[in-house]
Image (tube, rainbow, N blue to C red):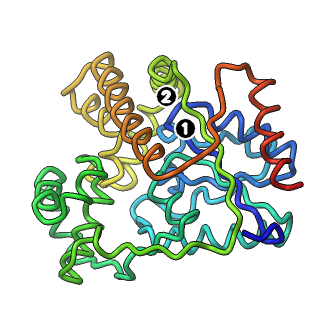
Amino acid sequence: MAASLPLVLVLLGPTASGKSALALELAGHFDLTVLSVDSRQLYAGMDIGTAKPTAAERARVPHGLLDLRPPDQPLNLQEFRQAAEAAIAAEHQRRGVAFLVGGSGLYLQALTQGLQPPAVPPQPALRAQLAALGPATCHQLLRQADPEAAGRIDHADTVRTQRALEVLYATGRPLSSQQSQRPPAWRVLELGLDPSDLRQRIARRTRSLYADGLVEETQELARRFGPNLPLLQTIGYGEVLQLLAGELSEAEAISRTDQRTRQYAKRQRTWFRRRHDPLWLDPGAGATDLLRAAVVAVEGVLG
């Protein structure tokens, strides 16, 4: 692709792999805005449970695609892509480079490979019916009707499960059969992190979430939006709801959050290795050497 085209720099990897720390350094070095590609960080109020950048980190470098909506107004992939492409265009105008950071594989694929989701508007009445059925029944329906989509959507991911069923019932065709690709007119450089000690990193991250106030954040979200909010069934929040209901001890909640996070990270690793071809960096090299390798890679493309 022509070197004159604007660049999209991507830093991807499974959860807790060290993306945020490296992103801060790269953004500072190249005067970039960190554009988050995280399917939960785009919701306001979901801060601790999603490991959203802190106020201090946001003051250090600009961040975008955070807090786009309250969690009771979910965005579908098409809506996110529109918001992200506007942010990318603004960064190309300002700097000539847009910097995407995250681990939500489907969202990244939509942006970097031009994945085109079907243009099906939200169906409030259908969503209400699906919510009444519950996440387990909905995921079972999806497995029967669209096993490919069900295979890449976690059984507890109520939002994406409902969206896949919404597309299926609105069009009569599985979501997996309707996602075409139209590569964007950008150069793309993908850098990847996949540390060998990811299990230990996840365990530390999980303990930190609980220590930093995940229980209190979940209580506030449940108070404002109700405990049946679909996003409160996702990793971390779902276990805290069980803790608050007396169904789990704190130790059990932490253990289950750790387990669900490891399962999610495994799916992320599989996704990135099958659908992306990043330059894999070595997180074990130390922070200074890691940043140096990333800078060299980016400068090699910028020229």
Q: Is residue 102 left or right of residue 202?
A: right
- From the viewer's side, name the closer residue of 83 and 126: 83
Q: Position of residue 269 (x, y in %)?
A: 44, 38
Label 1 crowd bin: few (<14), some (14–19), many (20+), radius 10 Å? some
* Residue under the point 86% across and 63% down: 95
Toward which corner of the image does residue 76 lie, by quadrant? Answer: bottom left
> Relative to 186, is 229 above or below?
above
Label 2 to label 1: alpha-carbon separation: 8 Å
Q: Is residue 130 left or right of residue 57?
A: left
* Residue with the mark numbered 1: 51
* Residue with the mark numbered 2: 209
Toward which corner of the image does residue 239 lie, by quadrant? Answer: top left
Residue type beneath disc 1:
Ala
- From the viewer's side, name the closer residue of 253 and 241: 253
Residue type beneath disc 2:
Leu
| Residues marked 2 and 1 touching at CB (< 8 Å) | yes
Q: Position of residue 128 (x, y in %)?
A: 20, 69
Mark nearer the N terminus (2 vs 1): 1
- From the viewer's side, name the closer residue of 263 and 230: 263
Residue 67 numbered tag: none
Say what secondary structure mark 1 lies in: loop
Q: Position of residue 135 (x, y in %)?
A: 19, 53
